[in-house]
Image: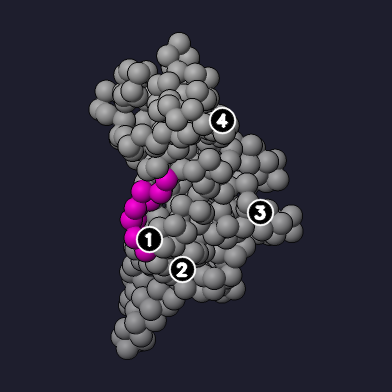
Amino acid sequence: MRTQLLIRAGLLASSLACTACALAPADGPATRDIVSAGQQDARVEVVDLTTDVLGRMRALDTRRGFADRLAPPLSGAPVLGRGDVVAITIWEAPPATLFGAADTTGATAPVTAKATALPEQTIDSRGRLTVPFAGSIDAAGMTVTELESTIVRRLKAKANEPQVLVRLVRNETADVTVIGDVGSSMRVPITPKGERLLDALAAAGGVRQPVGKVMVQITRGAQVLSMPLDAVIRDPRQNVALQAGDVVTALYQPVSFMAFGATGKNEEIGFEGQGISLAQALARSGGLLDSRADARGVFVFRLEDAASLPVSRGDVLPVTADGRVPVVYRVDMKDPASMFVAQQFQMHDKDMLYVSNAPVADIQKLANLFYTVVFPAVSVGTQFR
């Protein structure tokens, strides 16, 4: 009788232990589950990080800087436009007959050319201005030199060897707009020297946040490009020359990644705008827990730009509305070479760093549950003995 009770108690404990196995607590998928998902689910790509993969990622990186993606502005003098204010001065060689008064005193002293300064004039909404004896001129789209030549050509048959000087008094069209988290949003005129990105930001009073947490966005026509401000400061090539019509926006945009799983801390962790490596991200998240972490199961979950994928997706279309593809990058930290890979792999904003539990950690959890179930059952059997 006692033997039967002990057997029944053991069977009950085994049944409960099996149920507990399915209900064992976990903080995320195991390494094998993620790898299996990449093999079976066409919507998720699991990529093992190697030096070859890193090389392809650098070659395909669509986050290149301003210098690589923005065409330099056309060289040459600034072009006049509607609303610009100009001052025109005309000289006529003696004896001046059109703009200068003739000498009627009979003096024998040499007659010098006199300058005639016309009132300042605004190029109208049709792009035109008017010069006495030269008529209406389509000035919009001309450079200052071209406008001078046009006026001289029209006066040649009427004035005595005319010379013309045109000065741009107020520039209302060749400018860039600086807005966002700056000292003062404003329009910055483009002068003949050619203003650059940092010149425009300085003219607007600089940024109001730490440079490590500010993104600079340049809108030029249909192009909208952005870079961390400190990356622009550190790389002089990225301090690009601006062109008329550009919009420069300073955005306070802290970047961060999220750490989950068998790491020292599970939380959202901020980092500098110039970026950090996977090795730095692991260090800032407290590293891998010796008692739980699977060193072969270090993963970075990312919504990757389809054009930046280091592997071929075939005919599988992106699953997000903005054309991005779910990618899981895996690092095997058991391999010493992966230490160097982790130093070169750059984290992106909103990446999710996940370290899976080692199989032995799951066995340990199961053992704890097993003992929690078996010991009470054995105690019950002992009481009936």
Nearer-N-terminus badge (1/2): 1
- Do the residues under discs 1 and 2 have CB atoms within 8 angstroms? no
Nearer-the-camera pick, 174 or 285: 174
How many numbered discs? 4
For badge 3, the amino acid type reads Gln
Q: Can residue 320 be spotted in the picture?
A: no
For badge 4, the amino acid type reads Thr
Nearer-the-camera pick, 173 or 282: 173
- Tag 3 secondary structure: helix
Foreground tag (2 vs 3): 2
- Do the residues under discs 1 and 4 have CB atoms within 8 angstroms? no
Identity of the residue drawn at 33% across and 38% down = 120
Foreground tag (3 vs 1): 1
Residue bearing mark 4 = 108
For badge 1, the amino acid type reads Val
Residue bearing mark 1 = 182
- Tag 4 secondary structure: loop
For badge 2, the amino acid type reads Pro
- Do the residues under discs 4 and 3 have CB atoms within 8 angstroms? no
- Do the residues under discs 2 and 3 have CB atoms within 8 angstroms? no
Q: Which residues are magenta?
A: 178-189
Nearer-N-terminus badge (4/3): 4
* Disc 3 packing (10 Å; few <14; some 14–19; many ≥20): some
Identity of the residue drawn at 51% across and 54% down = 198
Q: Distance between the Cα atoms at labels 1 and 2?
A: 11 Å
Q: Position of residue 327 (x, y in %)?
A: 48, 43
